[in-house]
Amino acid sequence: MTKPKKTPRPKAETPKGFRDYFGSEVTHRAEMLSKIAAVYHRYGFDALESSGVETVEALGKFLPDVDRPNEGVFAWQEDADSDKPGDWLALRYDLTAPLARVYAQHQNDLPKPYRRYAMGPVWRNEKPGPGRFRQFYQCDADTVGAPSVAADAEICAMLADCLEEVGIDRGDYVVRVNNRKVLNGVMEVAGLAGEDKEAERGIVLRAIDKLDRLGPDGVRALLGEGRKDESGDFTKGAGLDDTQAEVVMGFMDAKRSTGAETVARLRELVDGSTIGAQGVDELELIADLLSAGGYGPDRIVTDPSVVRGLGYYTGPVYEAELTFDIQDEKGRTRNFGSVAGGGRYDDLVKRFTGQEVPATGVSIGVDRLLAALDAKGRLDKTADGPVVVTVMDKARMADYQTMVAELRQAGIRAEVYLGNPKNFGNQLKYADKRGSPVAVIEGGDEHEKGVVQIKDLILGAKLAENASLEEWKDRPSQYEVPRDQLIAKVREILDLHS
Amino acid sequence: MTKPKKTPRPKAETPKGFRDYFGSEVTHRAEMLSKIAAVYHRYGFDALESSGVETVEALGKFLPDVDRPNEGVFAWQEDADSDKPGDWLALRYDLTAPLARVYAQHQNDLPKPYRRYAMGPVWRNEKPGPGRFRQFYQCDADTVGAPSVAADAEICAMLADCLEEVGIDRGDYVVRVNNRKVLNGVMEVAGLAGEDKEAERGIVLRAIDKLDRLGPDGVRALLGEGRKDESGDFTKGAGLDDTQAEVVMGFMDAKRSTGAETVARLRELVDGSTIGAQGVDELELIADLLSAGGYGPDRIVTDPSVVRGLGYYTGPVYEAELTFDIQDEKGRTRNFGSVAGGGRYDDLVKRFTGQEVPATGVSIGVDRLLAALDAKGRLDKTADGPVVVTVMDKARMADYQTMVAELRQAGIRAEVYLGNPKNFGNQLKYADKRGSPVAVIEGGDEHEKGVVQIKDLILGAKLAENASLEEWKDRPSQYEVPRDQLIAKVREILDLHS
């Protein structure tokens, strides 16, 4: 290895928009992914793991949910500096584009329908912002090659199961279902069906997609003449007249107290449109299938106000929302909102093969879900630091090693202090920093007597905080026990605090 | 989403040197990582997950184990096409370089010593070859800031525990320990100590590192005048005379039947060298500490023939080797070889901070370890396909959905057939392709009678293979049971085959 000489020291920083995850941040996510994987597996989905790198050609140079194509990915050319530059490669921006490539590449070997789940990091070359990172986890399940909306229904049920499995109680979430075909019907009724109306339909779709951000008035403006935003930029509208615009607005507003009423209202709205009627039928069928499986409106509802992704999906669209309030960083109460979404998209592999293959799938935002569990106090924050065997006499390291080996063999997380043992205070500070429940001490005196000192650090911390309280007075936080009772005593203390 | 029009279809292929992992390939690895993480955790290591992307500056533009610096990573420049191009970014090539960056960046917040484990993909921009991929998993544990070789000893013990935990029996592996300081002593004795001998020491280190590939004769040639390889290329040697070369060769050959004899032989070899004696002392201490923890030479041995990484590490070096034979792709019996390695490197964060911080760590090659378990027949290959509820009557999808919901609620992996149900044969073919143990059938007749047909597909496959055997004659592979006994009967069949 050549040592860099006389070069300025490199900056020890993550690239902008990236971050490190420590300890329980990693393990909480791993546990969540493992629970979700178990549900996906129980529903019959098989694991797939593709690599983080794809050819730009296979990936498609666009993100589905940004306005600018050709942007948003980290890309580089193979052997860029050589005589024969190679393919352009890029980091995957989601797990759906690789699924399309995998299905097209391996379709002769895959079962049909192909039901796969995938979980892993994806990368977005976007401007980083607060809480917005350029690498994050996705956790998807998709069914490829199943035209039946039974596939959509089951993904909604699975989504509900996943949320409950990771610790969101029933009643604290709702899965909302909508259907792009109903919107198509609405557009037909609003007179936007023709070939020549593609531009207007595009504007309507984009406007609806912005409902969360712009509110009904903003969307209404975009359906009409257009809208000037805060910066003064003007976005041209779809040019619908009032009657037309009201049909579209009515669609988003069609939610009624019961699913049956909502469906009835939607039927009215799309009256006369074949595709619209088909969309309403599908919504009804999905509700029936879910109800047959025991998934009623306490968990999954028909809701035309779900608009996110309607521009991307071709049939049913679903979204899981957490319904409890949390305090935001400014102390304001707000609704937690969406943690997962998905829908049906029938052109998954068409880019590769020319065939239309129906597909439907869901993506769970694990990082948001973790934030939600954290806000609800549902993440296990119990300190699980290791038992620390302190080093009183460096020459007796072998004895300490024996103790720690015994502890580990008993399944107890433990370590010998491996820093410089000179300053005993540093050893206890280390144990504190690690959140250690117990410190084991065996100096020369103890060794001669055949005993060890066992310090209950959790109780010790409580005593330090509440030193004046009567109830603590007679409770020792340090015990001397015979060496051969080391494991038993440590176990006793751990059990006390668990 | 803009639809690509009239563009040629993209090729559905992974980039060269990348691959997809399906089903049990993914879950076996996930299980192994989870088992190893549990051992690392029990030893007191905390999880760390850094992102796949680092600045080239932080990463250092080199791989430790290739001859060519500035190569081997996938890199790109931020905003390369803009007026203000940004930092060069790259995919991490291992988990140690990011650890160095993390430690330098967060050192004020981290406990000292900092003990972390990390697992995840790394990327190498190398020429792909058979079985050689440009993305693969690493699974590391390192202790940063612990000068004591007790840290090295415990990593060797942990490595042994990890191997047993994932299914390698005691006796089927050995952890070998060597020490760079002993080699330094050997070089001193061979007269290669001076400042002016740095070039020769480098050649010796690189020569020794190639022992596996070149054999003793090749290394001996490189210690002397040099070596001509098969292609005729000549590599200049270190120019040692016979006496000098024999000292170095003697080092690699110093292994004796017992650790004490090996240590004695090494002491002879480094006689007169302070650093060499210190290295031998460390080897002895490591053996003592391990022995105190119950890790004897049946698991961990002192072995100077471990040469891999000696050029990179600065103190103890360790390697885990599987000792059983396997058949290679050409049917030849060979030793499985190395599955993990590591050692002490004291310049981890020096690049960033100027400080020397002692560190020691191990990296387990999970993909090789999986291959080893596979070769030993230790991977669970039991088909775990879902129970398939077939669709006899599309209009009764809700009934099938109810069945599958019941099965899943009973913890049984199950799905409704979601393809086109027209051809019943295709449904059974699908179940076969998925490795389904059971198919559930409920046509109109069954529905009227309140029964379901339950097909034992595993037994059915056996019957088809052994149709002539007497013993199978009277065993049905299909059962008609009342609808309310669906779960019980499916469970009974699953239990039979588990």
Image: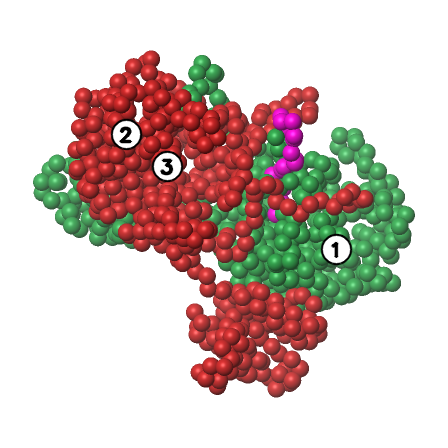
Chain colours: A red, B green
- Same chain shared by disc 1 and disc 3: no
Q: What is the C-alpha distance between the residues marked 2 and 3?
A: 14 Å
Q: Amino acid at mark 1?
A: Gln
Q: Is residue B85 magenta?
A: yes
Given residues B107 and A145, the one toward you in this image is B107
Where does the magenta region start and end? B80-96
B347 lies above or below B206: below
Q: Is residue B184 magenta?
A: no
Specify the label residue A249 is tagged with: 2
Chain identifier of the residue bearing label 3 in the image: A
Q: What is the C-alpha distance between the residues marked 1 and 2?
A: 65 Å
**Residue B20 appears in the rendering:** no
For mark 3, give the secondary structure: helix
Q: Amino acid at mark 3?
A: Asp
Q: Where residue A452 appears, x then y in whole percent?
A: 58, 80
- Residue matched to label 1: B355
Secondary structure that dominates the magenta span:
loop
Q: What is the C-alpha distance between the residues marked 1 and 3?
A: 52 Å
- Label 3 neighbourhood size at 10 Å, few (<14), some (14-19), many (20+)? some
- Residue matched to label 3: A212
Determine whether, in the image, residue A411 is placed left or right of residue B303.
left
| Residue A246 location, quadrant | top left
Q: Where residue B356 appears, x then y in whole percent?
A: 74, 56
For mark 2, give the secondary structure: helix
